[in-house]
Amino acid sequence: MGATAIVTRFAPSPTGHLHLGHVHAAAMAHRLARQAGGHFLLRIEDIDPTRCRPEFTAAIQDDLAWLGLDWDGPVRVQSEHLAEYRTVLDTLSARGLLYPCFCTRADIAREIAASASAPHGPDGPLYPGTCRRLPADQRAARIAGGEAHALRLDMQAALAALAAPLTFDEAGQGRLRCDPARFGDTVLARKDVPASYHLCVTHDDAAQGVSLVTRGEDLKPATDLHRLMQTLLGWPEPRYAHHALLTDAQGRRLAKRDRAATIRDLRAAGVSAAEVLRRAVP
Ligand code: GLU
């Protein structure tokens, strides 16, 4: 692979069997890498133990292999890298960019209901900042008392640490301006899982040398936050190519509930790999 050859990845969460929408994404990442003589990586985003299951991780690999979507190198399994995510959190914490949040969902809902405005971001209502205002001694006492807490990014402090406005390079669209403030004080480590999607995806893309991030356009807004993480942490900037989501004949987005579209079922029904790829990449 040359120094400029691209590295792409397919990064499913093993919460169910692959459907045609996943194959659409995987086939795009695979094609772009293979056309350029680059690398195509497989990453399993399984940090949520309540939603992810090892049998789906195995089934994903089996379906991809059956489709001929071969990946390079070992599969990266996020749940095996929690210590690395911890190190990133420690770095941000030492720079005063994180704070512990003890709020329950009910606390947050109550606070939002009581406030005059309830701004929404791409991940839902913005956190009202309750725990950002906690005095340091109260924070320390509650942590010492073993109270469960998430870790939130202090968005204003993070934005203040930037030297220049953030942008990203989107295929066919040139450089787009980022507005990460829309996410507010986003959770980087959950109460139940010491990490989060936004933390792990940016860490791993950097750790794996991913140079072209391909994924569905539903995740395009998240790129604003991902560029912030990459910039705060001095990670390289990948290029992005967000693709339209595959829809069914009625124009509805394919989802895991559409059992008819799982690759398992298509295989069991005797549909060939070539035909599955044809349906996934019309
Ligand atoms: N794991 C994410 C998903 O299954 C995709 C992450 C990404 O491509 O950035 O939706």
Image: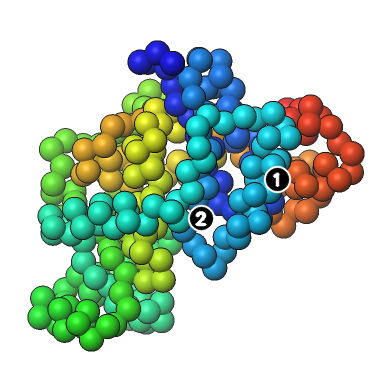
**Image coords of residue 15 (percent x, y):** 61, 57
On residue 46, the disc is 2
> Which residue is painted at 79% across and 27% down in the image?
274
Front tag of 2 and 1: 2
- In the foreground, 250 or 142: 142
- Badge 2, how many Cα within 10 Å: few under 14, some, many 20+? many
**Image coords of residue 129 (percent x, y):** 24, 70
On screen, residue 215 above or below 190? above
Left or right of 86 on screen, residue 39: right
> Which residue is painted at 24% across and 75% down in the image?
130
- Badge 1, how many Cα within 10 Å: few under 14, some, many 20+? many
Determine whether the residue tagged by mark 1 lies in a helix, strand or loop: loop
**Image coords of residue 155 (percent x, y):** 23, 56
The residue sitting at the right extreme is: 270
- In the foreground, 268 or 25: 268
Name the residue that disc number 1 marks.
19
The residue sitting at the bottom extreme is: 145
- In the foreground, 170 or 102: 102
Q: Quadrant of residue 204?
A: top left
Q: In which quadrant of the rendered image does the N terminus lie? A: top left
> Which residue is painted at 21% across and 58% down in the image?
90
**Image coords of residue 68 (percent x, y):** 69, 28
Query: Label 2 amino acid?
Result: Asp
Verify CB contact (< 8 Å) between mark 2 and mark 1: no
Left or right of 13 on screen, residue 125: left
On screen, residue 8 above or below 121? above
